[in-house]
Image (cartoon, grey):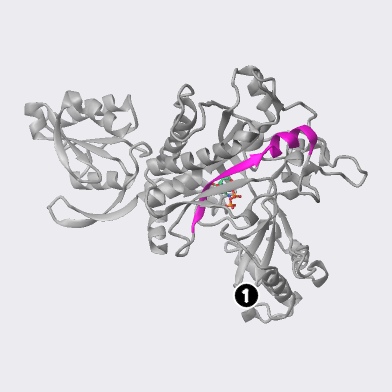
Amino acid sequence: TLMEMEKLVSLCKRRGFLFQSSEIYGGLNGFWDYGPLGVELKRNIKNAWWQDMVTGHDELAIPAGAPTTYEMTGLDCTIIMHPQVWKCSGHFDLFCDMMVDCKETKKLYRFDQLRGRWVSAQGKKVRLQPKVISEGVQQIQGDEIERLFVTSLAEAEEEAGDLQRRALKAFNLRAKDAEVLEWHESVMTLDKLDSLECVFAPEANSVGTLNGPREFKLMFPTTIGALAGEEGRAFLRPETAQGIFVNFKNVLDSTRVKIPFGIAQIGKSFRNEITPRNFTFRSREFEQMEIEFFCHPEESRKWYEYWRDRRMQWYTDLGLAGERLRLREHDKDELSHYSVGTADIEYAFPFLSEGEYGELEGIAHRGDFDLRSHMEGKLVKNAKGCLEVELGEDGKPKYRGSGRDLQYRDEVTNDRFTPHVIEPSAGADRGALAFLCEAYTEDSAPDDKGQMQTRVVMKFHPRIAPIKAAVFPLVKKDGMPEVAQEIYRALKKRFPAFYDEKGAVGRRYRRQDEAGTPYCITVDGQSLTDNTVTIRDRDTLEQWRVKVDDVVEEVSDRVS
Ligand code: ATP
């Protein structure tokens, strides 16, 4: 529920999982920092992914459900790449959103051109009937507008007020008709009001064809060196995938990998989202964990099914079991223009309404679209439904590809082909958010006086818990701190551990419960006579005694 979400958001700040970026300056919409606990959580998620997908993968054995054995390797590419990469991939022309306000559903929709579908402002995929779209467009031309696309400049109310007044005047509206909605920062200033008007201008809204709604480029532009204008213009990557495609040949030539094989990459991506919201779910700077899996075209469907199921299993194994997690196969009309099949792994985040799910990861069958684009140039679908190079007005390719041969030659059969690609594309931040939501639990536990009290506990899977164990001396005397510190130092060599000797022991347990620490080790009076300590289990609250010499092994076994 929303209340659960509010509690989680406040815990994240209070305990140092997540902070608003640049908070002391009022924050920056769509940007988030990971605090001392958050950084460990996110790192654990990325490490678990890398270990399970790349370094821990056994290329000699056929994994359950896989058609054959396969190899996995990694890459770490730059955030800024040659601008031609984005022209050929389609992002330069297509990676933008269009907005429309639908009177009927009272919702703001954006059109994701790359995927060719409407999504709600929350990012939920929606299917709008053309009728509804045209009504939406008509309605925003009329004088019955109930909601207005105006910025919510919460921090600068004066300016927002002025903007609102001018917008109201421009559309001849009464103040009560307008409800201020969030809007893109590029129209947040008064001098942009003119461009705002074009959203509503009748001639710009050719009803039913969607030409009208305003476009928002989602790629962040930047400038390289001192070159002015077009020449120095570059972009921050909106996905990590393209770095893998353009290095396909390098990986083949520098390793001995044979098809089928996958290349994995973890890294930052940037999208100038129109409506960043729902905590870190839709951010403007985020981290992706992507695999491009190259296979023979004839095998690609089997591999798609394998990766879809394997990725779903990964989340389940790390504790996202239960009905909040689901795998949703896209309908035919939802598929990107190049895709044969796509499935989303989704989670019912508490900030979504009942029955709504948010995407954690997409697994897409991309055919040979990407490698061909980087060989030949930007591709479009022709009348027959086949991909061909898009031509410019001069009849030449609109964007030229690299001209490099990115085909694969099978050494045994001598067969030459452009590999097909299966792409499991996950967001590390959305994963972290789902794990945080899933972990948040309220139950009851006895306090120092034995009274039952409500406790907040983050039930993380031990693999992703930020701190694996905490060590407490029951009291700060009789040599207990010394024994506890020795255990603490031994644990620290293996994994993040925490030492705490301040305050009542019940309080100390409670603090570790909120941090999601699976085990607390306490040195008490008995420890000094028989050399044993207690270990407390975060979830069951069970306590048992273990020899001091066995503590490290016991905890290590349980958290790995
Ligand atoms: P959405 O429809 O929610 O915008 P998408 O379908 O555009 O997502 P992809 O382009 O498939 O997302 O990106 C792959 C993954 O990257 C997503 O499943 C998600 O986990 C993550 N991701 C994409 N955009 C964002 C964002 N703005 N903030 C955080 N994570 C994101």
- Residue 159: horizontal and vertical position, in percent? 66, 66
**Frontmost residue, 348 versus 419:** 419
Q: Which of 451 and 353 is in front in this view?
A: 353
Eyeballing the image, is 252 above or below 35?
above
Q: Callout 1, which amino acid?
A: Glu
Residue positioned 74% across, 34% down in the render: 374
Could you say where residue 546 lies in the image, as x and y percent from the top left?
Answer: 15, 30
Residue 488 drawn in magenta: no
Which image quarter holds the N terminus?
bottom left
Compared across the picture, whether 170 is left or right of 301 comes to right
Q: Does the magenta stretch include residue 365?
A: yes
Query: What residue is pinned by disc 1?
Result: 104
Residue lying at 41% horizontally and 60% vertically, measured from the top left: 6
Image quadrant of residue 482? top left
Residue 14 makes an appearance in the image: no
**Chain part drawn in magenta:** 357-377
Q: In this view, does 90 lie to the left or right of 467?
A: right
Above or below for 523 versus 251: below
The residue carrying pointer 1 sits among few (fewer than 14), some (14 to 19) or many (20 or more) residues within 10 Å by Cα, namely: few
Quadrant location, the C terminus: top left
Could you say which quadrant of the image residue 238 lies in?
A: top right
Q: Is residue 69 left or right of residue 547?
A: right
Residue 529 pos. (x, y %): 6, 27
